[in-house]
Amino acid sequence: MALQLEALSKSYGTVEVLRPIDLEIKDGEFLTLLGPSGSGKTTILRMIGGFTQPSGGRILLDGQDLARVPTNKRPFNTVFQDYALFPHMSVAKNVGYGLSIRRMPKDEIARAVQEALDTVGLGSFHDRSPAELSGGQRQRVALARAIVCRPRIVLLDEPLSALDAALRRQMQGFLKDLQRQIGTTFLFVTHDQQEALTMSDRMVVMNVGSVEQIGSPKDIYYRPRTRFVASFIGDNNLCEADIDADGRLVTPMGATARPDGVEAAPRRVLMAVRPELISLSPRDNALETEAEVLSVEFAGAGSDMTLRLPGIETPFTARITSEPGQTPPAPGARQSIWIRRDDIAVVEKAAEQAP
Amino acid sequence: MRKSLAERSVDWVLGGLTVITFLVLYTPVLISAIFSIVPTDRNGVHWNEASLQWYGQLLGNTSVLNAVETTLIVGLISVAIATALAIAIALYVEWEGAMMRRLLELFVYLPFLMPPIITGLSLLIYFNGLGIPRGTATIAIGHVALVLAILYRLVLTRLQSIPRSMIEASADLGATRWQTFARVIWPQLRSAAVTGAVLALTISFDETFVTFFLAGDTTTLPLRLWGMMRVGFSPEINALVTIVLGVSITLAAIVALRLNPRGTLEEE
């Protein structure tokens, strides 16, 4: 059963920071809450941890309501954004803190601490003080401190945001491997969409206090269901299109067969196409059109080509893999492009037009 | 690079002012100290007869010794109580979201900020009204009211530098509130509390005005000194002043060493 959120909500006075949300967190999964600041993602994490009181709804662990269970009795441990290591304690004392509170015998604590420190690759750092550690090392100590008590869920509150880019990449891989290795549920909060796509089994995309979409990283990336998700996650080309009475998608480039999971009722929708899914060579089952090249930017691994498509106001961006020696089309040239029908995501407008 | 004449003259003026200031401030102190050792009379200063006899006489003076005892008892008890109170109030204000925080802090600071004559007099009227006899206990209560502000300020500053997430982390790892205080907060608060306590002890040690109103028949060291001076100066007074100064300066030096220049506290 694991953890269930039922209509969980939070308001401060009249400000609703989290609209009622339902969510199930499965045992052993790596679930990410992704959203810009003010989206309510940290509020969810803090309510699960017991640091913030919900305004409404319930948090159930294996079917049991946690409302009356205080933070120190919840089987969760948190990795805080600022790590919150105790500055007056050695690394070993920090990691062993939870166990010594539980009155575990000293030799068992020492063994568990050693194991946890080995797991995070700091096996020889016992006697260091937190002040002597680098940011990445503190991060690992905080992680060791959170996993050593074997919690049901590890709550991670933007733990990588204070690290520089290279270290962050490295820690992402490390965290994911660690989670697989110990098999504990990780609930990870971040505003970094690349981080969420890399690490998550499932992700919850949030915006201004409500859930926009829940799904696997691939789902979210290729099948965004709202304009926010389509534009927040990665780059996307968006334009208006229609669904006709037969459920077919009618685009300025032509019509396609009825996309999966789209209701057959005439209406305006948005279509979204990833820049890397626009092809300069013929593809099967694709829409074809002739575009005007506005500019070409070399970007190392590829080139970003800005294109004016007939009947579409906003220019599209196409990401073309460069091959050395190959000359990309010059600005002003006419260029035929192909977009596979399956690569077009349909984003309903209805939801966002509602007041 | 060599300094110009103008620059050097500025250095000289500033240096000179500093020297004069120190002379004005510390010459009387030095003279008391000297005259507590060297006897003087109408014929002048008898340098060759320097001795510690006046200190010896003080040691034999039971009323002075009693005053010292009272001063120490009052100091230790009032500082201990004020430290505990300051920590409790600071925790309440900082973490429990005290109601009417501003007002509460005003009450803490007021006895220290008001003229001592007001603080002393109002306490006196209060104890009188309640029919509490004046003595060591009332002096101690007066000193608690006086030094609480200093202890509170130092403890609160340190407490505010402990991030909230650290307290949350402790609870998150299973600690009760009491365990969190004992294991996470107190170890980080201790140095500030000790510094504040030493500073408070310095103030309590030579506090005169408030004590004057609350003492009754009891005598503290500063009151005893005051009483002795009314009957005329004696080398014994010089000896007593030197002792009071010595203790005060030592305590103040301890505080100064523990406080770093920005007024925050150094890590232990």
Image: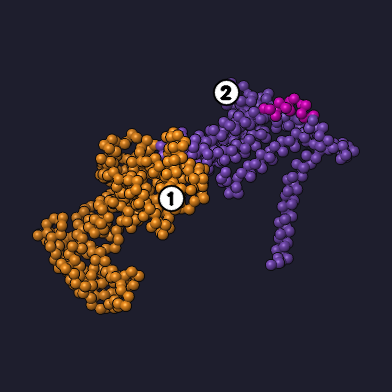
Chain colours: A orange, B purple
Q: What percent of the width, then of the height, locates residue B208? A: 67, 33
- Residue shown at the point (84%, 37%) measured from the top left: B50
Q: What percent of the width, then of the height, locates residue B66? A: 71, 26
Instruction: Tell whether A3 sits left or right of B241.
Output: left
Chain to which the residue tagged by mark 2 belongs: B
Residue nearest the observer in this picture, B228 or B177:
B177
Q: What percent of the width, then of the height, locates residue B166? A: 45, 43
What kind of residue is marked 2?
A: Gly
Proximity of marks 1 and 2: CB atoms separated by less than 8 Å: no
Residue nearest the observer in this picture, B101 or B116:
B101
Residue nearest the observer in this picture, A80 or A294:
A80
Tell me the magenta residue range: B57-70
Instruction: Tell whether A186 sits left or right of A347.
Output: right
Vertical relation: A130 (above or below) B137: below
Instruction: Tell whether B181 sits left or right of B192.
Output: left
Q: Is residue B191 visible?
A: yes
Find numbered disc 2 in the image and state the secondary structure of the residue it sits on: helix
Chain to which the residue tagged by mark 1 belongs: A
What kind of residue is marked 1?
A: Gly
Where is the C terminus of chain B found, in terms of image quarters?
A: top right
The residue pinned by badge 2 equals B129
- Residue shown at the point (32%, 78%) measured from the top left: A325
Quadrant housing residue B255: top right
Residue most toward the right? B43
- Residue shown at the point (49%, 35%) measured from the top left: B182
Q: How many numbered marks, from 0 up?
A: 2
For label 2, count other residues whose C-alpha is less than 10 Å away and answer few (under 14), some (14-19) or many (20+): few
Quadrant housing residue A10: top left
The residue pinned by badge 1 equals A121
